[in-house]
Amino acid sequence: MHFSFLPLAFLAIISPASSLSDHPTPADYVQRGGHSVARLGDFIYIDGGWIEQYQGRHGDETPFLTVNSTLSIPLGTSWTNATLNMTDIEKAGAPVLIREAMWTDEARQLIYMWGDVEGALSTHVNDTLTWELTGDGTGGGSWKFENLESPSQMAGLQRASAGAAATCYNTGFNLGGQTTTQNGTAIFVPGLLTYNMSSHTWSNESAAPFTTHGTSVGAEAVCLPDFGPRGLLFLGGITSVDNNWLDPVSALSKSPGVAFDNLTVYDPFTREWYWQTTTGNRPTPRHEFCAVGVQGPQNTYEIYVYSGFATQSTSMLGDFYVLSLPGFMTVVGGYTDPSPDPWSQGIGVFDMSSMSPRTSYDPKAGSYNTPGIVTDWYNNGGVDSVRWSSETVQQLFLGQRKQNTTNLNIPQNSVPKKPNTRVIVGSTFGGVVFLSILVVGIWWFCYRKRSKMAKNKLYKSEVNEAELSSYSPALAYELEHKESTLELQGYQEPVEM
């Protein structure tokens, strides 16, 4: 991994190891994976997954061990990859999960955990309990569980791992994912699950507009705060093969994946689904990648897509793309060698403007600016070439534009509330790794490469242009519309870097 905006610093963590520690020394670290990340205040919290490290004087590798504590990284102070110290937080009985959803409630300084399989135990989580981490403002915190006020709410709701999760408008979302049956077979979990953090109510509805059966594993969800339909954009992933959504996830080696030529947007207030085609150099289908959104100063909204596993292949990708809204145009941001990164503690900070690596983190770096190749596209009238899927979608993305669009050929009619400073912190923990992207807030981990993996080949495949019609789900649920409370697993208040 080798890139980011300095204003938009892209931090990659390929975390290290010491004698069987949850965050070993650089010399002992082998690989880490299966974890999730969330931002709360001025800290990134890393939870779940497993780690492999060297032990003994002969340097023998341990088997994968579950990470039994939650780790935090400070964002309010400067550090180098040689001086960074992560804080350990005891789990206090909270389950160790694989690829769980982490939903943040900034107002109450809480992180909710939602997932299925408990680490190497492959056991299921008690459905009548919810777990939450309360931050203490210093990088520490404590876990506790609460019994559901109405356990009947969970009837028909299935816990899942590796879903497309995000926090948006004080509500946690999780689309799809997988669960494990009693005989050990991983199967898809269909639907879009929601959790309202104020009313503590749960709901589930069909996600059929995203994929045929509403199933998906390894996709990403990005909140579009105050932009377009003010909803969620779903990207990538792999889905059921043929017509049977009960196919085991192992059958996904046959799946072509969800193409990036046709994107799905969900409006949580009207519960409507929309689709729109993209133009430009689109990413190849992939899953367990990284995606993060950031609003530009000239009324665009960029989504950065990095790495991931190629579909129908185990190859780890090293490419980087930028999708810009409202133009729905994509450009290639670069390519990086997915072989191991040689930095201290496996942590690298990337200047995405110069595409060059750094070894230090600075919370006082400059504000985010939209890449020149993107602004040039708008300045040259690129948005006029967009073939909108419907007048409704066109109105959603162009009818509510803001006036701060200097030099950009974009319709406009309102003023942004405040400057947009953005940070992307990515964390790729070696091994079957994850890349965490942090934009002013938390962005999460995506599978990266195995630490011993050599250079990988990009997988090329034909993309399917499946048009998704607008869909109005039958199930309603409460959703708070508070523009000042936008906690997304990836959207928080600005943090300069």
Image (cartoon, grey):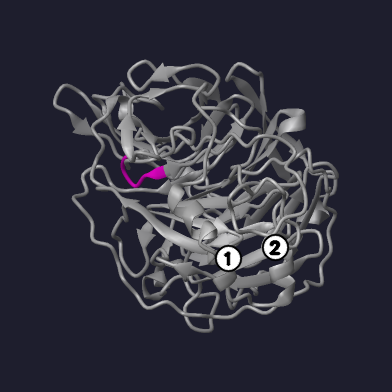
The picture quadrant where one finds residue 131 is top right
Position of residue 257 relative to residue 28, above or below, is: below
Q: Residue 290: percent from the left, percent from the top? A: 46, 50
Q: Nearer the viewer, residue 362 or 184?
A: 362
* Rendered-image quadrant of the N terminus: top left
The picture quadrant where one finds residue 397 is bottom right
Can residue 156 be seen here? The reply is: no
Q: Residue 34: percent from the left, percent from the top? A: 44, 45
Question: Amino acid type of disc 1?
Answer: Val
Q: Nearer the viewer, residue 295 or 11?
A: 295
Instruction: Look at the image and give the residue range highlighted in magenta.
Output: 430-434
Question: Amino acid type of disc 2?
Answer: Leu
Can residue 250 be seen here? The reply is: yes
Secondary element type, mark 1: helix
- Magenta part, dominant SS: loop
Give yes or no for residue 310 being in the magenta stretch: no
Q: Nearer the viewer, residue 394 or 315?
A: 394
Q: Residue 358: percent from the left, percent from the top? A: 33, 28
Secondary element type, mark 2: helix
Q: Nearer the viewer, residue 125 or 267?
A: 267
Residue at the location (76% across, 55% down)?
154
Who comes first in sequence, dot 2 or dot 1?
Answer: 1
Position of residue 351 relative to residue 73, above or below, is: below
Give yes or no for residue 432 being in the magenta stretch: yes
Image mark for residue 383: 1
Q: Residue 195: percent from the left, percent from the top? A: 75, 50
Residue at the location (37% across, 67% down)?
311
> How many neighbours does mark 1 have within 10 angstroms: few (below 14), some (14-19), or many (20 or more)?
many
User: Residue 233 vs residue 363: left or right?
Assistant: right
